[in-house]
Image (cartoon, rainbow, N blue to C red):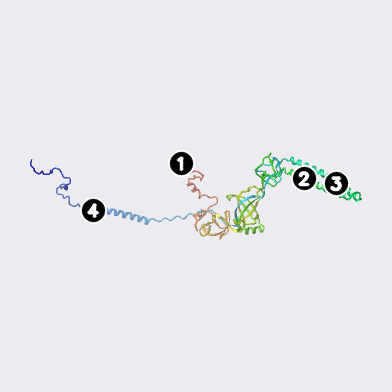
Amino acid sequence: MSEEKKSPDNSQPNPWAPQAAPKPPPPASGVNPWAPQAAPAKKRGWLTVVIVLLIILVVGGLLFRLLTLKPKTAPPPQPVRVSTTNAIKGDIGIYVSALGLVTPLATVSISSQVTGQLTNVNFVEGQMVKAGDLLAQIDERPFQAQLTAAEGTLERDQALLDEARINLKRYEEAAAHNAIPKQQLEDQRSLVHQDEGTVKFDQGQVDNAKVQLAYCRIVSLISGRVGLRLVDPGNLVQSTSTNALAVVTQLQPITVIFSVAEDYLPQIQHQLGIGNHMTVDAFDRAQQTQIATGSVLALDNVIDTLTGTVRLRSVFTNQDNALFPNQFVNVRLLIDTLKDKTLIPAAAVQRNAQSAFVYVVKSDQTVEMRTIKTDATDVDTIAVEDLQPGETIVTDNFNRLSDKSKVAVRKPGDESAEKPAQGKSGDGKDGKSGKGKRGGAKEEKN
């Protein structure tokens, strides 16, 4: 074998060897593919001209539209529909409000003054009774027997007294003729005095027995309403018991006690000093319904140092029994009356950060926002200044008004302005309660 060096095999390709660039395809005959081609200049120029013309036409059309369009005149504002009233001249009271407690003039606990068995109860719970009406009956037989015994003792001692007096008269005649000793006459006089004392004692026993017998009939001492029954017939009642048989409360008249600030004390004293019966009105808890009207009965003699208030007692006839004992009521005390003031509804007064004002309707059906000064207020009426009686003022739709606004006065009962709004709100065509068309359709489907 020859030691010749074998040459590398070139039949296998080398992947790491640089690749030769691909040869371009053979050109067509007579054409140079690498020569620059001519751009379509004419086509692009026409396109630009068309776009510019379109922009000019659109802009010109818009300008022509804006220049030739006539501005529409805004419709005149519609007048605001309002309700009105006239200011009047009159009197208005100055009131002080307080919380009052209904207090009866008298409350009597009916108890037995003797010890005995309760035989009858002659009242119904809650019954109205008069003074002297029989309420209960206690067995009176033991007390009748005591009265009989006392009357017998009285008759016996009365006979002894009569005999002693006869003997005294006989002794006085005998002593006048010196027929008997003087000492015997004096002894007879002493015996007469002794028998007189015995008769008086017996008479007291009889009277006491009559009183005890009368106590068996338990009667009402006042007129009023009886409360619930506390003892049933058949029970033994004691004169020393603290439990009452019944309680009677006077309702007519009845009083209300309330407190006011001590600042009003001079005015109250002045009114009471001149003999003026200050009017007091009692209202319910909501201060909407007036229960009764009365007058001041008395003024307390001290001021409460803890609250700085003074108590007053007012009296009410209470013919309809509207005031009930221990009921809380709202009290209004009339302490003064302002005469000849301009009065308007309190709802017509509006307020801003500076002052109070009202809208006054002028002759040209416009409103004037006029500043006023307010005075006393009585429920829904207020006294004002800077407003003349007879002037017309607005009472509603304030949120749509301003100074010099045009208004249309709504006639009484005219609610045409509110009906369309109610019909569109889905409450029914006729303004009746219920759903609208859309809501009603849903209910039918369901």
Point out which mark residue 205 bears.
2
Instruction: Give the SS element for disc 1.
Output: helix
Task: State the separation of the CA atoms marked 3 and 1.
Answer: 116 Å
Q: Earlier in the sequence, mark 4 or mark 1?
A: 4
Task: State the separation of the CA atoms marked 3 and 4.
Answer: 176 Å
Residue 439 at x, y = what percent? Answer: 47, 43
- Quadrant where the N terminus sits is top left
Query: Which residue corresponds to the image point at 84% horizontal and 44% vertical from the top-left?
Result: 160
Q: Name the residue type under label 3.
A: Ala
Task: State the separation of the CA atoms marked 3 and 2.
Answer: 22 Å
Task: Give the residue number, with chain letter if any, for mark 4.
Answer: 42
Residue 324 at x, y = what percent? Answer: 63, 47
Query: Which residue corresponds to the image point at 85% horizontal and 46% vertical from the top-left?
Result: 164
Instruction: Give the SS element for disc 3.
Output: helix
Q: Nearer the viewer, residue 359 or 221?
A: 221
Q: Is residue 153 visible?
A: yes
Q: Earlier in the sequence, mark 4 or mark 2?
A: 4
In this rendering, is residue 270 above or below 17?
below
Q: Name the residue type under label 4.
A: Lys
Residue 263 at x, y = what percent? Answer: 60, 58
Q: Nearer the viewer, mark 3 or mark 2?
A: 3
Q: Nearer the viewer, mark 4 or mark 2?
A: 2
Q: Name the residue type under label 1.
A: Lys
Q: Nearer the viewer, mark 2 or mark 1?
A: 2
Point out which mark residue 164 bears.
3
